[in-house]
Amino acid sequence: MKNQLQQQIASLSKERLAGMRRGIEKEGLRALPNGALALTPHPRGLGSALTHPHITTDYSESQLELITGARPGVQECLDELGEIHQFVHRVLTTQCDEELLWSSSMPCVLPTDETIPLGRYGLSNSGRSKSVYRMGLGHRYGRRMQTISGIHYNWSLPGVTSKEYFGLIRNFRRHAFVLLYLFGASPALCPSFVEGRQHSLQPMGDGRRALYLPHATSLRMGRLGYQSDAQATLAVSYNGLQGYADSLHEALTRPYLAYEQIGIRNPGGEYNQLGTSLLQIENEFYGTIRPKRTTRSGERPLHALRERGVEYVEVRLMDLDPFEPVGISADTMRVLDVFLLHCLYSDSPPDTPEEIAELKNNQHLTAERGREPGLKLARRGQAVALAEWGLEFLRECEPIAAALDAAQGSQAHVGALRAAEERFNAPDSTPSAHVLRELTRQFDNDFIAYARSRSQAAREALMQRPWSDEQQRRYVAMTDESVAAQRAIEQADDMPFEAWRERYMAVEQLG
């Protein structure tokens, strides 16, 4: 496999590598200065969450999502993400009583489940459908789970076929534990997140202000995170576009008794959810990585995939890095680029139900016990030490890092990869270990005090960066344009919501 990988990388031209694109979607809660969830509407100064190209909301009205374009350079992408953050912090500081953008993947102090505000997107049919979808997620999984935040890394390379992208996805899932170990940064949380739920977390100190697992890397990606018993029944195949699309199609059309009992509307006529199938829409399917295709207006994502194939992949397992002002570093992005190229160009045999179960268990083990000395994962039925397997994988990545550096005239990728390898030799150097150290030594086992301090430090660092009048004018113009665009969509609607919902949810729309 190593020789094949080296041959593939050697054949990559400088021009093709220059065509690589990456973009970031970064979620983060708005929190009050005291560390409680902000329950205020999406700030007017940030424009329309429905139509703004860079600033929207995710699940909750209190959960911002900041979006870059697809950029040819790591630093270019990071600079854009920083600029969006700068504008957001200015609005939150001046117009929203100094609300914070929460720097941790695990949430701030949460109110009762039903008090967490759902995202609102205006009066248009498409805007209403987004809110109804979120209402459905709340009924199905609870609202607290949806307040977990992370970073999605969207990545593409010119000339890659759908078949090759699915090979990448299979390999990504096999080696996802590497990223969880290296970059997981959510080993602890506020007790309000699990109030009333069964869990196996341990108390930090007296347990009133923080709960944790001593060797966890990413509780967000463990059993307490985006997990679903209903979705566990899905047997999604990643062996090709046809099989994947068929699996998703079945989940989108298969009735599910528990959701049928919830109903589409309550007795008062208000909507509970968009539909009663196992998945309401495609985005409800949880996964560490997704094949994606840009949709046209009103088009279902599954239809777009079937019609035009995979355009890029969306990596979904990255925690927010609380030690970086924008939640991710340039070196982390460089490792991701190298990692994804390895997944693309390595041999990728078909997956099996047995392997899929093995990989899910590996994910949970790494998320909850990844820094445990001697921890073993399963590889094709054989036990192998996590550290040994991770180092083996990263060493196979070295020619890829060297090729990227040669194409760009730098040493940045080799340096980032070397730092990643060192983390496998020193678990205490990982972000998750760093979080627990700070929590214990500097914040007396108080998760909210720790995360609030990190959030304030991130805001201060970003507010100190240069900000020109031209930047301010540009972002204010985007805000105004987004509000006008939402109004235009609302005025153009020409059918009742129920008719629109039935048409959008129709099986024929799936392609």
Image (cartoon, rainbow, N blue to C red):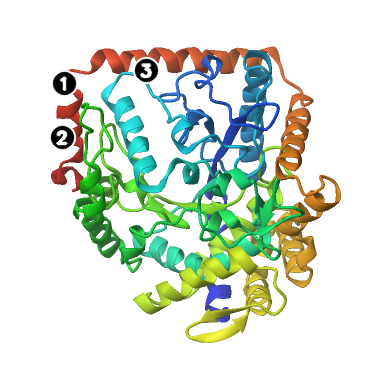
Callout 2, which amino acid? Answer: Arg
Q: Earlier in the sequence, mark 1 or mark 2?
A: 1
- Rendered location of residue 365, percent (x, y): 57, 70
In the shown orientation, is residue 434 left or right of residue 326? right
Dot 1: within a 10 Å radius of its alpha carbon, few (fewer than 14), some, or many (20 or more) residues? few
Which residue: 60% across, 12% down? 473
In this view, 8 is above or below 492: below
The residue tagged with tag 1: helix, strand or loop?
loop
Residue 178 sits in quarter: bottom right
In the shown orientation, is residue 27 left or right of residue 248? right
Q: Earlier in the sequence, mark 1 or mark 3?
A: 3
**Residue wearing tag 1:** 495
Q: Are marks 2 and 3 in contact (CB under 8 Å)?
A: no
Q: Are marks 1 and 2 in contact (CB under 8 Å)?
A: yes
- Rendered location of residue 32, percent (x, y): 65, 26
Q: Nearer the viewer, residue 141 or 87?
A: 141
Residue 494 sits in quarter: top left
| Disc 1/disc 3 C-alpha distance (Å) | 17 Å
**Residue wearing tag 3:** 486
Q: Earlier in the sequence, mark 2 or mark 3?
A: 3
Residue 391 sits in quarter: bottom right
Q: Nearer the viewer, residue 210 or 379?
A: 210
In this view of the protein, can residue 25 be seen by the observer?
yes
**Residue wearing tag 2:** 503
In the shown orientation, is residue 439 left or right of residue 394? right
Callout 1, which amino acid? Answer: Met
The residue tagged with tag 2: helix, strand or loop?
helix
